[in-house]
Amino acid sequence: MTSVRQKIVAAARWGIENEPRIHYGEVRPMPLGRTLPLTTDCSGFVTICYFLAGAPDDQQSYCGIEAQQKMQPFKIEKSLSLFNR
């Protein structure tokens, strides 16, 4: 069985593999899929990873309009730490 953690990492790695087709932009509502080309910002990308993994929407970001400032700071740090294991 694949854990939520593994699914978050898989979604982030998909982003790394497709980096040339992912562009920066503060787009709202946030996209929540793997449609390329993709334009999103940092919080949007983390939200996509969590959404694709089926992780809980603790920040109510899946509606696509959550502001970056309202995201829990540890969410991005936690995501990055997944790569260091």
Image (cartoon, rainbow, N blue to C red):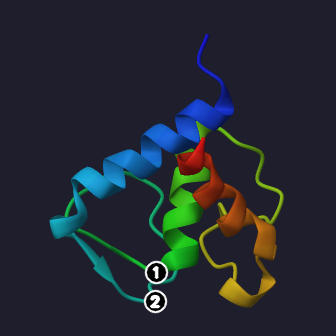
Residue 1 image-quadrant placement: top right
* Percent of width and height locating residue 19: 24, 64
Label 2–label 1 contact, CB within 8 A: yes
Which quarter of the rendered picture does the C terminus lie within? top right
* Residue type (three-letter) at the residue carrying disc 1: Asp
Q: What's the residue at 57%, 49% (across, down)?
A: 84
Which residue is the extreme one toward the left?
20
Q: Alpha-carbon neighbours of circle 1 within 10 Å: few (<14), some, or many (≥20)?
A: some
- Which disc number belongs to residue 68? none
Instruction: Please give left or right for residue 41 compared with residue 4 in the image.
Output: left
Q: Secondary structure at mark 1?
A: loop
Instruction: Work out whether residue 29 can be spotted.
Output: no
Instruction: Work out whether residue 20 can be spotted.
Output: yes
* Residue type (three-letter) at the residue carrying disc 2: Glu
- Which disc number belongs to residue 26? 2
Instruction: Please give left or right for residue 17 compared with residue 63 in the image.
Output: left
Q: Earlier in the sequence, mark 2 or mark 1?
A: 2
* Percent of width and height locating residue 68: 67, 85
Q: Secondary structure at mark 2?
A: loop
**Nearest the camera: 42 or 39?**
42
Q: Which residue is mark 1?
A: 41
Q: Is 75 drawn above or below residue 81 in the view shown?
A: below
* Percent of width and height locating residue 36: 21, 59
